[in-house]
Amino acid sequence: MAWLHTWAGLIVSWVLFAIFLGGTLACFDKELDYWMRPALHQLAPGPIAMDAAATTLREMAPHAETLYLRPPSARDPSIHGFVFEPGKPTIDVALNPRDGTRIPPTVGGNFFFVLHYNLQAGTPGVYLVGLAGMLMLLALVSGVIIHRRVFKDFFVFRPQAGGQRAWLDGHNLTGVLGLPFHLMIAYTGVIIMMSTYMTAGVQIGYHGDLAAYYAALSSTPHPVEQHRLPSRVASLNKILHDAVQRLGGPAQYLEIEHVHDASITISALAAGNDEVAGGRRNLIYDGTDGHFRGESESPPAAYRTYQFLSGLHRVQFGGAAIRWLYFLLGTAGCVMLATATQVWIEKRQRKAEAAGLRSGYGLVRALNIAVIAGMPLASVALLWANRLLPGNLAVRASWEAQSFYAVWLLATIWAVLRLRRGKPWRELFGMTAALLLALPLLNALTEPRSSLLASIVDHDWVLAGVDATALALGLGFAWLAWLNTRPRKNVRRDARIGAASASSHAARPREKSA
């Protein structure tokens, strides 16, 4: 079990760190979207232009059969448009809620959401993330078995010990602290994509027809095409107003099906912000005259179970308090993974040095630094790029994404070059701290109406929260940089401790730790 715990986690540890960091930041993806779209920060009061937004979306995808429009919400004041066309890139745009025009594009917080479930690598990334999730489940279960002193480890942290002992205590503490969360998040993360990973049911039961499979999951009746143009199209503004009245709360999105046919149908799905599984109610309207046709039946129990598990992972329920809980536990997961890899590398390198052997772990150490210290730096660099790139720049969102990859690559090169004659941990953590602490100042200089002070005066707590969180995280990374300024302890003494620890573990294999 100790062997399984070590290697199941280690093989994909860097991938898991990227997944956890991306998923942790994605807890506030809509808030980051809002911060990265200054055009939304000073919206004048007025009606929601759903019809104008639909017109813009139809112009962007003239051949699409189905359009999705997400009305403004407390977390996102824009109208969001989605179009999924087979064989074409997905359209995902933010539209001005007052006139329906397109807001200057940005990767937004959605960049981190996509990063955490496919590593920005499409279908191959989905499978790699799925493999990482399954191995993480193995590592968690085997970790529980080998840690008989799990409750004691929860209360033990000895940073003053330094070196291997402090790293191991940090791994045990964060692992035990977030164990239920980590088990849930790994399992539900795999379950969400089960129709991709386990295709036999679709292949046999539906002869590989994914459309038929999803139609069976949905309780919403699909209209039969009439193969003629609609005489008119109903007002989405009126339908949205009626749906809100009938639902007694906000609608999550409007679905416009058979856009170019007389059978055009508009559905309004309840937001269901207080339900883990999301909204149950789905209202159906005629797309030509807007009259209410009725309410679809509740989804099958199996699909509601899937929605519940998916909802636990996506954290679209419970408000800001639950998102902050997920954020903190996700951060604990990042620390757990970072300390685990550091324990593994340092332990083996010190054993080699104590034995007088030439260590071959230099490149591994450098890459470990590049992932754990370089990825946070790249994430902050993306926010800086959002403020520094010209607003009218072509493919601006692509440039933002490229800035993330470029800074991460530079951090990797820096870690390799500075490993022997520098302190890359301290230097990269220090750079991250400096960028985070200066981010509110950059925001104030480039977007004065969106500054921290202006946001507080306007009671815009989302904008203020992003800047305040950047300051708090900046102080945290500054503390990490300061910790890495302390001189390294004597290698021989550490080697003796590691050897004694290894002997103790060998005598008690059931207590062996990663």
Image (cartoon, rainbow, N blue to C red):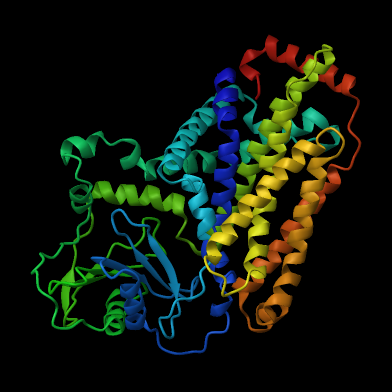
On the image, which quarter does residue 333 sit in? top right
> From the viewer's perspective, is residue 474 above or below residue 459?
above
Q: Residue furthest left?
A: 226
Q: Nearer the viewer, residue 489 or 323?
A: 489
Report the residue at 63% width, 30% height from top: 150
Q: Is residue 457 left or right of residue 398?
A: right
Mark yes or no: residue 190 visible.
yes
Picture coordinates of residue 145, whole percent (x, y): 55, 23
Report the residue at 69% width, 9% height from top: 507
Q: Residue furthest top?
A: 507
On the image, which quarter does residue 201 sit in? top left
Picture coordinates of residue 142, whole percent (x, y): 54, 25
Give the position of the N terminus as an image quadrant. Answer: top right
> From the viewer's perspective, is residue 481 above or below residue 337?
below
Picture coordinates of residue 399, whole percent (x, y): 58, 61
Q: Is residue 445 left or right of residue 14?
A: right
Picture coordinates of residue 148, whole percent (x, y): 61, 24
> From the viewer's perspective, is residue 343 above or below residue 375?
above
Report the residue at 50% width, 64% height from top: 319
Q: Residue furthest front?
A: 394
